[in-house]
């Protein structure tokens, strides 16, 4: 039930720190170590390449997951949009392992790929929020995201839960492969949950940002580099899905290869910066778009912030920043939809679970 909340989406945004803390208890044993089904461990030990298959927001979580697996566990990962996989079927490695990410576990496009790869005898893990769902039943293994029922069509808490479970899985793989972990996963997840809470308590500030940057605009660009680019894709999807503002996420470096032509006086650009190694580059992208009249809202992280940034998220480990940086983007989408009088929880033309291909 919604309780005191006007919309499920707002309730689900607020639940995110709680979900992360719940995942820490679900995936941690009494000794503070990761607890995961031994069969999943074995399958991941044997693989030489992971193929993540998903749609929409779950695909965006998969992109973050790729970076986590490659940085933490040194396993190569490809991420595929389910609806494209069968046409652009990748050449598979000798020991592929598939991970299907799906909040509902019912998405037809993802299931189509699962049925296909099972015919070839490949192993699949379903990462889903719904135990007993079709993808869970038809996969060899399941990991549950424990986000609780997600009612709003726009996915929020499922996304952060998927990222947290992918981080847990990647850390577990690293340990099993004898790779020295350079960060204390559960401690960092706890710190991330605290930081998420801080952002959730800054709704008024985010509402003002929406008022200032998005009250009249028909379009909006999100720019970021490295993992921030993936979060920009998610922020743009959220905004277009519920507020019907045309929004696109771009890699900062791609601007000069075409997109910058779209920037004119007053164009809103939301720039995300959580990764120190891209700081200089993204700030010069911001200068470039500002010089062409863009109305830039800079969202950065403590440690690399500038006094002129509109929003600064609390510092957390650089592997986990999407858990926190996505929250202002979710809230921006929420308030933009609200101001436009849109049906926040049930946007037009969309269904919560897409069971047709
Ligand atoms: O249930 P799934 O995670 O498989 O759903 C995938 C997409 O349909 C879903 O994430 C969709 O993009 C959301 N409405 C985005 O907010």
Image (tube, rainbow, N blue to C red):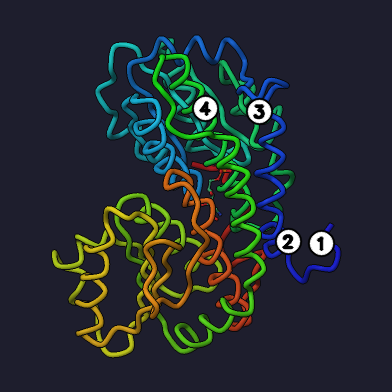
Relative height, residue 99 to residue 13 (above, below): above
Residue found 49% across the figure and 20% down from its top: 124
Q: Position of residue 301 (x, y in %)?
A: 44, 62
Q: Residues within 10 Å of mark 1 (few under 14, many from 20)?
A: few
The answer for how far apart the CA atoms under marks 1 and 4 are is 32 Å
User: Does residue 253 sit above or below 193 in this rendering?
Assistant: below
Residue closer to the observer: 230 or 180: 180
Judged from the image, the secondary structure of the residue bearing numbered disc 1 is loop
Discs 1/4, front: 4
In contact (CB < 8 Å): disc 2 and disc 4 = no
Q: Marks 2/4: CA distance?
A: 27 Å
Distance of label 3 from label 1 (alpha carbons) = 28 Å
- The label nearer to you, 2 versus 3, is 3
Q: CB atoms at circles 2 and 1 under 8 Å apart?
A: yes
Residue 2's disc number: 1
- The kind of secondary structure element at disc 3 is loop
Residue sitting at x 63%, y 44% = 190
The residue at which mark 2 appears reads as: 11
Residue pointed to by mark 4: 169
Residue 86 at what x, y percent from top left?
35, 31
- Quadrant location of the N terminus in the rendered image: bottom right
């Amino acid at each position: 039930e919604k309780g005191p909340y006007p919309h499920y989406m707002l309730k689900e945004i607020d639940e995110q720190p709680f979900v992360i803390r719940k995942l820490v208890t679900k995936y941690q044993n009494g000794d503070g170590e990761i607890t995961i089904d031994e069969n999943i461990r074995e399958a991941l030990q044997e693989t030489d390449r992971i193929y993540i298959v998903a749609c929409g927001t779950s695909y965006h979580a998969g992109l973050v997951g790729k970076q986590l697996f490659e940085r933490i566990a040194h396993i190569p990962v490809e991420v595929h949009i389910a609806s494209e996989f069968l046409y652009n079927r990748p050449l598979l490695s000798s020991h592929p392992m598939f991970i299907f990410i799906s909040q509902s576990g019912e998405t037809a496009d993802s299931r189509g790929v699962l049925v296909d790869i099972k015919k070839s005898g490949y192993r699949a893990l379903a990462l889903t929020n719904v135990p007993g769902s079709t993808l869970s039943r038809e996969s060899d293994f399941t990991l549950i995201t424990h986000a609780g029922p997600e009612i709003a069509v726009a996915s929020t808490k499922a996304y952060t839960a998927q990222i947290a479970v992918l981080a847990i899985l990647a850390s577990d793989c690293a340990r099993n492969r004898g790779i020295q972990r350079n960060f204390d996963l559960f401690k960092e997840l706890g710190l991330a949950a605290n930081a998420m809470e801080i952002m959730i308590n800054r709704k008024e500030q985010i509402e003002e940002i929406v008022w200032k940057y998005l009250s009249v605009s028909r379009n909006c660009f999100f720019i970021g580099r490295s993992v921030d680019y993936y979060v920009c894709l998610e922020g743009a999807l959220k905004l277009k899905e519920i507020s019907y503002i045309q929004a696109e996420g771009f890699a900062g470096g791609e601007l000069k290869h075409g997109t910058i032509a779209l920037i004119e006086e007053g164009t809103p650009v939301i720039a995300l910066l959580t990764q120190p190694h891209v700081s200089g580059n993204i700030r010069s992208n911001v200068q470039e778009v500002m010089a062409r009249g863009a109305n830039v809202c800079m969202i950065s992280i403590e440690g690399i912030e500038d006094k002129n940034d509109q929003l600064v998220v609390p510092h957390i480990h650089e592997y986990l920043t999407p858990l926190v940086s996505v929250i202002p983007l979710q809230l921006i989408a929420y308030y933009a939809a609200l101001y436009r009088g849109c049906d926040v929880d049930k946007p037009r033309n969309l269904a919560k679970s897409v069971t047709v291909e």
